[in-house]
Structure formats: structure tokens, C-alpha cells
Amino acid sequence: AQERYASIRETPCVTGCGTRVQLLMNAGLMADLPSLESSGAEGVGLFRTELQFLIRNQMPKRTELAALYARVLDAAKGKRVVFRTLDIGSDKVLPYMKPQDEPNPALGWRAIRVGLDKPGVLRMQLQALLRAADGRPLSVMFPFVAQHEEFQRARWEMEKTIAREKRLGHTVPERLEIGAMLETPSLAFASRRFFEEVEFLSIGGNDLKQFFFAADRENERVRRRYDTLNVSFLSFLENIVARCGDTDTQLSFCGEDAGRPLEALCLAAIGIHTLSMRPASIGPVKSLLMRADLGAVKAAIDDARERGEQSVRDAVTDYLRGIG
Ligand code: PEP
Ligand code: MG
């Protein structure tokens, strides 16, 4: 399938109306990195780090992680890689961690909550990332941040780790970006100060949608019940776009929807111009965006909303039929 899109692989994604949209890929294994070239992705918008922790029966060592992260950065050859710190929950139990008995694991002790309560692993991982970068630029984001203070505490862990690395005589990154995943509705309503402090935000649509609609992403019965192109959800995303615009905060979207052409088109039309997806989705998404006029898509979205439609899917599908 990648072959089909080979002719546009090196072409930067510019929509039919002239808007530049950055297409990045999601990854989680060293084996994913060759896709950076074959897909034409401009970088890795989400590197999920939990796999290395889940595939072993003991905690990986800092030196092992640092070696792996260094190989990832080498393979990226200067393209940006956004590393997400460990995102484990009581459903993704590490074999070497005491299992938690929680009635609602998705709402439980997971991701950055674990990182802040038991900071040993987070610190080890941050140190491994700094060592791997060895002076090169580094981007790190924290998963599942629900309020400003969690971001501040996580960033403080990074600052302390940097200070320690300097004391030990290690090189620290020439440029360090620290961001957060926006995957709980609460964070979208954080104070302006939060948006000013965070360098970038990446919308984790898989989780954000499950919490927005109160529909478990793992539950077949409800998981497809609410459309991403539902007008309520799009309005909510538009609010996030506006807040990021007001504060000059870089915004991207890295949930599965970014890789679905129609969804990607709508995300771009409401102003999300950085999308991170599976490598195989880059070609189809790019091909569609290059033919589309985002202003016309936005008009179709607004009209559908005016008409009281629940989802803009039909309206945008009609627009696509029109352009052939
Ligand atoms: C998300 O929630 O959309 C996301 C990208 O993170 P994950 O799917 O790993 O929870
Ligand atoms: Mg998530």
C-alpha cells in the first residue's frame, strides 16, 4: 500500500487551499523506525515507551533504556521524536509490579499518577532519555495529565534530573521541549497559565473521547457508539484549538483518528495542523489533504451544525464526493 503513495512520499503535505499540515508517525519499537523513511513521516509525534517495560519480567535497566532511546534518535537522523514517558495503568500491569485491585482501572492509578507517586521509575526514565540525547535536542511528554499541578510536578522531576546530570558532568540537551498529552477533558479547561507554561500539547483522542462520552474504549458494546465527528466533540476540540492559539501553544493530535482520512480532514479543518498516526496512514491522509480545501470542509462542518445534525460525517462525505 505504501507503494501507491510513493510519488508523494517526499512531498510536504500542503492542502489544496495552501495550508501546511505536518504528518508524523506513532511508534513504540525500534522496528518501527524504518517506517520513518518509507512512509514519508516528518518525525515521530508519539513514541510510546511502555512496550519495553511490558515485554520483560523485570524492570529494564537505565543503561538498556538509554541505549534503546539513543538508537531511536540515531535512526530518526535529526527528525523530531516525541518520547512519551511510561503510560501504564492497572490494566497494563507490569509483571514485576504489585497488581492493583481497582474497580475502574481506566479511571485509576495510571500513567503520570504512578510516575508522580512512585517517582523512581520516572526519574530513571528521564535520566535514560537525557543520556540517550547526549546533547541532541529532546522532546518529552507526560501522559494522562489531568491538571496543571501534575504537569508542574512532572516538569520539576525533569529539572531536578537535568541538574543532577550536570553535576555528574554529563551533557544535557541543547534544546529540551516538555509537553503533555491532553487526554482528560479537565485539562482542556485548565487555567491560561497552564497553556502558557506547557511547550506543546498532543491530544490523545483515544482516551479523550472515552472520557468525553463516558464510553469505555475497550468495551465493544459502546466503543463505536459515539462518532468522533459528533458536533459536541468537534466543538470541544475547537475550544482547545482556540486556547492553544491564544497562548501560542503547539498543538497536535495523536489518537487513532488522526490516521483516518475523513477524521484527519476534519481535524485539519478545525485548525489542528499536526497529526501523528500509524505510518501506513500517512499516504492516504496526505493524498486526501492535498486535494482538499479546508475552508470548504469547515463550511460543511458549520452548516451541518447549523442544521442540527448530530455528526458532520455525512456533510463532509458529501463534500468529498463533490471533489471526486
Ligand atoms: C490516546 O489516548 O489517544 C493515545 C494516543 O494514547 P494511548 O492510545 O497509548 O492511550
Ligand atoms: Mg492515551
Image (tube, rainbow, N blue to C red):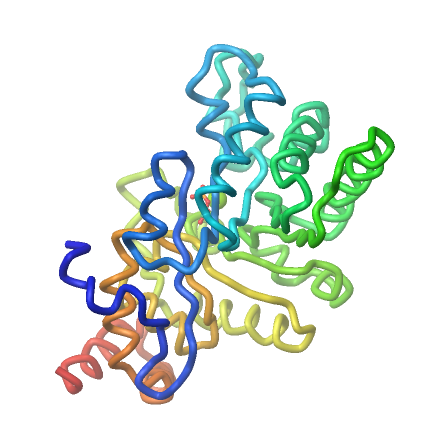
- Quadrant (top left, top right, bottom left, bottom right) of the C terminus: bottom left
- Return the x and y of residue 222 as percentages of the image width and height: 31, 46
Question: Camera-side residue: 87 or 58?
Answer: 58
Res 324 seen here: yes
Residue 93 shown left or right of residue 287 in the figure: right
- Return the x and y of residue 13 as percentages of the image width and height: 35, 73
Res 300 seen here: no
| Relative vertical location of residue 108 with respect to residue 282 in this rendering, above or below | above
Task: Name the residue: 49% across, 31% down.
Answer: 50
- Return the x and y of residue 110 as percentages of the image width and height: 57, 32
Residue 100 shown left or right of residue 26 in the figure: right
Task: Name the residue: 34% across, 35% down.
Answer: 31
| Relative vertical location of residue 10 with respect to residue 180 in this rendering, above or below | below
Q: Quadrant of residue 292?
A: bottom left
* Residue lying furthest right: 167
Question: Camera-side residue: 217 or 138?
Answer: 138
Q: Quarter for ligand 1? A: top left
Residue 136 shown left or right of residue 39 in the figure: right
- Return the x and y of residue 254 as percentages of the image width and height: 44, 54
Question: Camera-side residue: 100 or 162?
Answer: 162
